[in-house]
Amino acid sequence: MEFVGTDRIHPEWHLYEQFISQRWLAVMQNDAVSFSHPINMQITRNDQLTSIFDAITYSKGSSLLRMMRNFMGESTFNKGVAQYLDKHKYGTAKQTDLWTAMGQAMIENNIALPMNTTLEEIMSTWTDQMGYPYIQIDRNYGSNTVNITQKQFLFDIDAQPPKSPHNYLWWIPLKMRSQRANQSNIMWLSKNKRTEYNVLSVSSSSSDWLLELEINYKTTESFTVTERAGLVDDVFNLARAGIVPASLIFDILKYATKEQKYIVWERILSGASYIEQMLSNTPTYDLFKSYMTDLILPIYDSLTWTEQPNEDWLSSLHRDLVVSAACRYDTDDCTSFAIKKFAEWQNEPSINNIDANQRRVVYCTAIRLGSRGEFYFLLNQYQQSNDPQEKARIQIALTCTRDIELLQYLLVIHLDPNIIRRQDALSGIRSVCRNFVAEAECCSISAGIQDKGAADSEFKSTIERIRANIYWINKAEPDISSWFLNRTLNIRLPTDWTPTLYEIEIDVQLQSTYPNNTEPNTKFSGHTIVTVNCSRSTSELKIHSKNLRIQSATLKRSDNTKNILIDWSFLNLTEIMVCRLSERCQLNQVYMLDIYSSAELDRDMAGFYLSRYDVTTNSEIVTHNIGATHMQPTVARKVFPCFDEPAMKAKFNISIIHDASFPTVRSNGELIQTTTFPNGRKRSQFDITPPMSTYLVAFVVTDFECISAKTNKNITVSVCGRPEAILNSEGDYALDVGSDVLTYFEESYNVSYPLTKCDHFAIPDFSAGAMENWGLITYRETALLYNNKTGNLANKLRVGEVVSHEVAHQWFGNIVTPLWWNDIWLNEGFASWVEILGLNNSSPEFHPLDVFVTATLHRALVMDSLFSSHPISVDVEHPDEINSIFDAISYDKGASILRMIYMVITEQRFYKGVSEYLNAFAFKNAVQDQLWEYLTNATTPSSILDGEEIKTIMDTWTLQEGYPLLTVTRNSANGQATIRQKRFVLDPNSTNQTSNYVNPFNLPFQWYIPYTYQSASGVLSPFEWLKPNETKIINIPGNSDDWLLFNIDQFGFYRVNYDLANWDRIMGALKTSSYNTSFSSVTRSQLIDDSFNLARSRDLDATVPLKLSTYLCNETEYIPFSSFSTNIQYPLIMFSQNESSTAYKQLQMYVQNLEKPIYTVLGWDSAVDDDYLKRQLGSLVIGDLCANGLTECSNRAVQEYSQWKQNSTYSINPDYRSTVYCQGVKSGTDDDYNFILNKYKLSNDQVEKNRFGYALTCTRNERLLGELLNDTLKGEYIRLQDSSTFIGRISVQPGGQKLTWKFISTRWAELVQKLGSLSFTLSSIVESVLQYVNTDEDLRNIETFIANTQDLSIAERAFLSSIEKIHANIRWMNTIGNDFRRWLDSNVNQTGCNS
Ligand SMILES: [Zn+2]
């Protein structure tokens, strides 16, 4: 009761929290041995009277009262106590009188007990037997239930407690809650049953409670302080009793670096001290100590030694606890402070300047780490002091010594009443014996003490504890030790060391050419000096290094010549090199890490690698070699040892030593000096870079040609590549657009480009599209080079887009970098959106803003409509995970939702916010919330955002997968429309699956949706908002018979559905001659795309898109046709699996009917000066019609092919070349195939080469296709980077699906080995091969393969999403496919435009 009373007076003491640790949890220790005793104990001997005034009586008693107070409620408890006191005042009372009074109060207050029990019976199970239960909770995740079992909790599993009247079963009041459910009412676990089954249905969550503890502690404090203390204490004790593995302790404690509360820390450190004692003589002890230091440091740093003004009592207890632990585990800062303080006192014994609160820790630390001098000094102080508190402190501190002779001496003087008073002796001896060094001495002394008397039972239980300890440590030590070893598998680097400068010299043994074109088997060596700051005093330095051979490594303080690096080892799984130091580094001192390494110059397109290309002169082929780099995301560590995380920015001073046969050697900084060595080799030295992330480091060693231009700010822009290509002007367009967009972004961002030059290099072997290395952007050739004779405008557009994208990154990504890879979507999405703005500025003739909708937004909508999609902002750690999120979701959805917010807030505010963001975080890192903050601030008035912050809005788009379907239902009577939202899922049957991602919202899959609308007779509405879970009724101005359209020009990343009547009005309007003034070409494209997809998701009658598309016979623009062509592919491929089916033929006829009118207009004769969109349209309809059986089309194609084959100077219009080559091979012979194959092998023009490659996959000859598949893995004439394209194209040819699946399933291991390290390749192979499978039998084969394959590598996600697609395909065939068949059957003949 003292607690209840005091809490009223001093609530600031947090006594209830205090209570938990002092009493409830502490008593559990004493009561967990078989030599404990019931609270109600038969007293048979006098000495037992003294010994029962122990913790059991005091603390267990009060703990039971607290338990009662909790289950009956405070008012009932107080009422019962009052009645009890009232009845028995001035008399004596038995325990049962209290139970009776409390029971009565419960009845009066209607608090139920379990059937047929009384409070007395219940409490008897707690007071008339010793010990207490532990409760085992087993969750059944299938049925969402839990089983609850009770057992007596004993540290020693072999202990035999005496018989109990209740057989060690208890009546247990229980409260439960889960992540999503509130606390339950009290329920009772009966003493009559050990196990209760299915007692409670817990709300759904598939993660276990351990995981919940971690996740929830991060986001919200889901567990109260008391619950956390209870969990921590339970896990320590359960581990100690061998009920759970000891490593679970450390799993639970992962969260503790964020824990602030005293009561929890008290339990952590108390539990840890047991582990410490147990491990003290094992090899694991050092690992444990360093683990504890890491755990304590954050809280130690925040509390410090110094008391704060107005600090409450609990905080000062907390400080004392944490500081003392920090010193005990040898945290440098702590021990050096203590030793310094003690030394001051020792030097001047008359003045003790040590703060009273600090003395305990200072004394103990000084004694433990000091020599006998400190010990005798302190002992002398003990004898001189008359202050009982000081004496008590010193007495305890003396026992901290590790010197066994001093401990023996201490025991001796404790038995000498002239030195230590008898009344203080026992506590001192206990304290000595708690020092584990002294265990043996204590055993002998305990035997020596004559009159054990009251201590008898204490000694007995000590022996039981020791026996349990020995048993425990033997069992637990291997588990703990392996946990600590795995701890070093942490993928992230510690932040102990901060790099500021890398000086890198790379020496590459490579020549431009070799006799007989031999492939060089060569290597490069590197000398790396990293200037690092010691940010935390540690005796270890971890740095990334992968496949590097380290010749030497030293670490010296910058002002010192002493090497403190003893040795190093490698953690291969995490690609980390661990350097062991001879001493801890000094905080905030600068060190130089100096490493010599070497590695292979491989052809793996990762790190620093070898790339080759052929030059044909007078029919002689010479193979040239170059070296190039690609570091993103985690490959720099393969080139030089580095802190390979984006947040660890540093400056780079790079030089390259190379053969004189390479005239064009570049890196991020400008070339500032070239030196020639006597042997003719050269050293190229580059300018130091601004602080930047390691993944942006780049250098190339080439014999390329370059062309250059200067911007108005005097920045040199260069485009470099194979001499043949550059001299053929293929870099000219890239140079134009590269210079234009550099100036455009400099002005739009309002931030200067921070380097003096920007190089663009076309690398023959390149795994990604391009890479935005700062000042030295590298590309696949097709993304940089444009040949205006062989290339068409689509090829040119691609160059413009990619160059603009990479230049956009020079600010957004390079100057300000995402803190970690989970925000990569922001980097890529942003560049993918502003590239469009940059290109629109530099090359508006491509209509980039319109093309974006069909090329990017529609693609993202399809990807993100699968249930297996992922949030664009996703937690990633392992390099494989990091690689896997560089996907279309990150790029295309990211760009689409940024476009949406850009449209809402306008370009001017958008760039204002971005500019301020770039300035605020220049040369540093940021997270997405910081961009939202700056964009919000730039958006005034706030009514534009409906008064919300951009973060609130955008979180609904980035933190959950998928997107909404806006459903508009009109009321024709009153002109109103109701709008509501739900998640759009392409396959409605997939929604019963569980998402792989934790949805952070209370209202999951609801969005903040900006919308606009327009009706036939109305004007465009301003932006308005539909909130999560909102249904809105809006008044539509104008005639209620009008068509109504939402999401005008598809600015928003979502789809819109209408009632059928409105769809009919839209279709009606499309069929009129004013269709193209009512609806923009983007809107027409949107209507086609939405209707096809809504039909697939069964939100719309399947025949609507087929009917709607018939308007296309009047259509003249590319954007709508492009949507139609894309959407009709799916039904075409589904039906084509049975090539001779009527449905396939009818669908082909349908396509012919809709596209033939425009084909007739455009013909085969597009002109060079025709608009880009017009030429695209011509190319599109020729491709579609030739593929779908229009004989006049394929005849013309074959005719073109033959003319060209016979006369190599005959020039086919580049717009149609793909179709012509394909038709030539398809209808041709082995000779035609080989003719094209030869062209493919010899061509250096990547655009032409791609067309030849595509044509090869058009052959109907299965033998040839088989050979072609084999060649994709040989790495000979087909570069590995192109293998996925080949396999994907073969798979969509009739019969190709089965062929390609057989190929990848039988040779999977080889694919993983050869392609696993190339960012996208393996996943895209899996996706393309599996996406159109539509039979149950094939599905079963694939599922078996997945189940039986150990290593799915980075394609795991691709397999999962493919399975979902296959299920959808099968369902489509049985449902919508049938609707299509029926509609085509009755309507295909009427879809001709002239009818
Ligand atoms: Zn990018």
Image: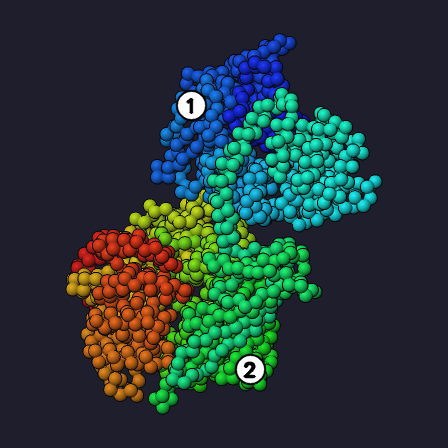
Residue at 57% in and 29% down: 462
Query: Element at badge 1?
Result: loop
Is residue 1033 found left or right of 1238 in the rendered image? right
The quarter in which the N terminus is drawn is top right
In front here: 414 or 354?
A: 414
The quarter in which the C terminus is drawn is bottom left
Residue at 30% in and 77% down: 1252
Callout 1: CB less than 8 Å from ligand 1: no
Q: Is residue 1097 above or below residue 1206?
A: above
Is residue 942 found left or right of 1074 in the rendered image? right
Residue 578 percent location from the top left of the image? 55, 58
First reached walking from the N terminus: tag 1 or tag 2: 1
Q: Which residue is mark 1?
A: 190
Residue 458 position by quadrant: top right
In front here: 521 or 847?
A: 521
Q: Is residue 553 above or below residue 59?
A: below
Q: Which residue is mark 2?
A: 682
